[in-house]
Amino acid sequence: IPFGPGFFTFDTMNLVGAVSAAVLGLALHQAAYAAEIVRGGVLAVGSGQLEAAAALGIPKLRQLRRIVLPQAMRSILPNAANEIISLFKGTSIVSVMAIGELFYQVQVVYGRSGRVVPLLMVATAWYILLTTALSIIQYYVERHYSKGAVR
């Protein structure tokens, strides 16, 4: 009962831990983007593909797994990989909750040493290195799924 007598109480600070809150927050933030990317990729596959599969008598699940998803991956993958890279860069937001990720660790070290700019440059270099590695992986995965698309 709002503003009335309380039947039971519990401490909300201990309801969700810091890491769980960070994962939940980042997952909910990315979930809408991911759903839209997958929806757009599946809709990009022509309806004639499904009609042809149905005419051959292929079951719905096999149509999805063998026909729709391999073709949809060509349009899903670039956007999804960009979202993963964006999520990686967005993890610096959780440093506000004192979770030990890269930016938080840099804050701890420059809090002790007082050398702010050099340590932020080191963090920048790490972010660039890791996002470049993810981009290279994205390139090869996209190249794998684009086989047969270029004639």
Image: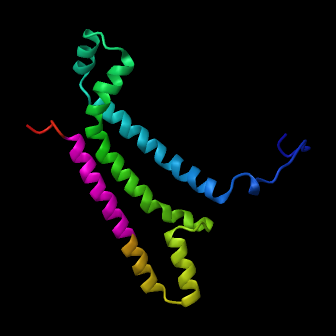
The one nearer the camera, 126 or 89, is: 126
145 drawn magenta: yes
Q: Does residue 44 appear left or right of residue 106 in this picture?
A: left
Q: Give me the residue at 69% from left, 53% from top.
A: 16
In this view, which residue lies farthest toward the bottom?
Answer: 114
Segment tinted magenta in the rendering: 127-146
42 drawn magenta: no
Residue 68 in the image, given as x and y percentages of width and height: 30, 27
In this picture, is 26 found above or below 71?
A: below
Q: Give me the residue at 44% from left, 85% from top.
A: 117
In this picture, is 51 found above or below 23?
A: above
Residue 84 in the image, given as x and y percentages of width and height: 40, 52
Q: Give me the residue at 39% from left, 72% from top.
A: 126
**Magenta region, mostly helix, strand or loop?**
helix
In this view, which residue lies farthest toward the left?
Answer: 151
Residue 127 in the image, given as x and y percentages of width and height: 39, 69
Res 21 → quadrant: bottom right
The one nearer the camera, 150 or 96, is: 150
Q: Give me the residue at 42% from left, 86% from top.
A: 118
In this picture, is 3 found above or below 109?
A: above
Q: Does residue 78 appear left or right of residue 85 in this picture?
A: left
Residue 95 in the image, given as x and y percentages of width and height: 56, 67
